[in-house]
Amino acid sequence: MNNILEKFFKLTENKTTIRREFVAGIITFLTMSYILVVNPNILSATGMDREALFTTTALATIIATLLMAFLAKLPIAQAPGMGLNSFFAFTVVLTMGYTWQFALTAVFIEGIVFILLTFFNVRELIVKSIPKVLKDAIPVGIGLFITLIGLKGAGIVVTDPNTLVTLGDFSQHSVWIAFLGLLVTGVLFARNVNGAILIGIVVATVFGFALGDIALPEKSIVALPPSIAPIFAQFEWDHILSLDMLIVVFTFLFVNLFDTVGTLIGVVSKAGFADEEGNFPQMKKALFADALGTTIGAVLGTSTITSYVESASGVASGGRTGLTAVSTALMFALALFLAPLFLMVPAAATAPALVIVGLFMISSVAKINFNDITEGLPAFITIVFMPFTYSIAEGIVFGMLSFTFIKVFAGKSKDVSATVYIIAALFLLKIVLDAMHVIG
């Protein structure tokens, strides 16, 4: 078995080991396992069966992550995307008034379109056309974004009606759980201890148990997963040719494309697989894995699948190949039957992992020439829009638009490729359509 894994994933060539890959996969799982709780909670607001959604979320994550592992051989996990599930539930169903079956149909169509776009290299062309300065800025923005996710999850940063955000309540145990985990993880990294992030998560979880914030499951930790029959392949074709269906599918396409692109560029760059232009050889296969994952996820009964930025935590722990993704998928498979045990790990215990990863991801800011305003301003907008709009996709949108406009009006239009002009035009079209929908 070891020889098979070595040969298929080229572990020695990638300077990694089976143990390191599996530990990295476990860490990725721990930092993104919240999706098993959050996705059912969000989608069940539409009337979908919550228990069935738990199983579907896990199954879709397992299948999509294994596709990434075996097609692209990258240490990146895939799951139902945050933001995309909210659009599915709160915009398409609860605001526009369509059924959840209509929304699932839109996701399925999106997946088919993505498969076609990937087959004809359109998605790969879009990824390669992103200016290098923005490819350097994307990991920085993602680093700040996932740091904010970690701080928010631990209660260190909280919402405030006057200042938007403020420092959290230090009487809350979650704050101290996170700080202890961060301290332990930082010290272990300083001492070059392997598995520092995982050890930090374990120590923080044990500390939370000692404080009484974590309780052992009252019932058995082993149980069969609920049936997905209530939501499996529940499509509705009545409105397939409507304008609303077009708008919904376009929105799913847009957000998923640039969430995935941003995550792939950010995580792959930190893994050291990208060239100087931010491109990498497995790009098309990674995009195929995403497209297939979304299509299969819709059949299973969940919203759009996307690559997860939390995969960077596994990369930071040494994950370099698809074996890391296999490990993550195995953890989700176990979670199907051991949900009470895995869900014991609180968000505060995984927050330090996200903060540490955020630190590692901002290093590419040194490559950006901020002395050239036509380079520095689009990069800065890309970076700050991601955490401030809580969206990787929006950071790329406004980064690309600012790059295009400032280059053109500064007399440097030769720096803008034809593909970037087309992408910028589509971004403007989406903004106009969104505005018209809100006004309407």
Image (cartoon, helix red, strand yellow):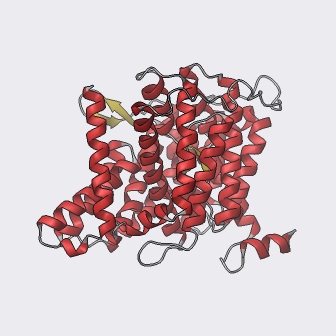
For the point 64% across and 36% down, the residue is: 36
* Res 203 visible: no
Instruction: Say which residue appears at 58% left-offset and 43% top-offset.
Output: 349
**Residue 159, position in %: x, y?**
35, 31
The quadrant of the picture occupied by the N terminus is bottom right
Taking the spot 36% from the left edge, 47% from the top edge, the residue there is 387
Q: Nearer the viewer, residue 156 or 388?
A: 388
Name which quarter of the figure residue 340 lies in.
top right
Name the residue rendered at 43%, 46% in the picture. 255
**Residue 40 appears in which quarter of the rendering?**
top right
Front-lying residue, 70 or 312: 70
Quarter of the picture holding the C terminus? top left
Against 334, residue 278 (above or below) is below
Q: Farthest residue toward the right?
A: 1
Residue 175 horizontal side relative to residue 232, left or right: left
- In the rendered image, residue 427, in percent from the top left (x then y), is placed at 31, 50
Q: Nearer the viewer, residue 166 or 413?
A: 413
Relative vertical location of residue 422 with respect to residue 278 in this rendering, above or below:
above
Residue 9, visible in the rendered structure: yes
Determine whether, in the image, residue 50 is placed left or right of residue 130: right
Residue 149 x/y as whole percent = 45, 43
Q: Residue furthest bottom?
A: 13
Asked whether, in this view, residue 145 is left or right of residue 119, the answer is left
Foreground residue, 114 or 347?
114
Quarter of image, res 278:
bottom left
Q: Position of residue 186 (x, y in %)?
A: 52, 59
User: Is 215 rendered above or below residue 279?
Assistant: above
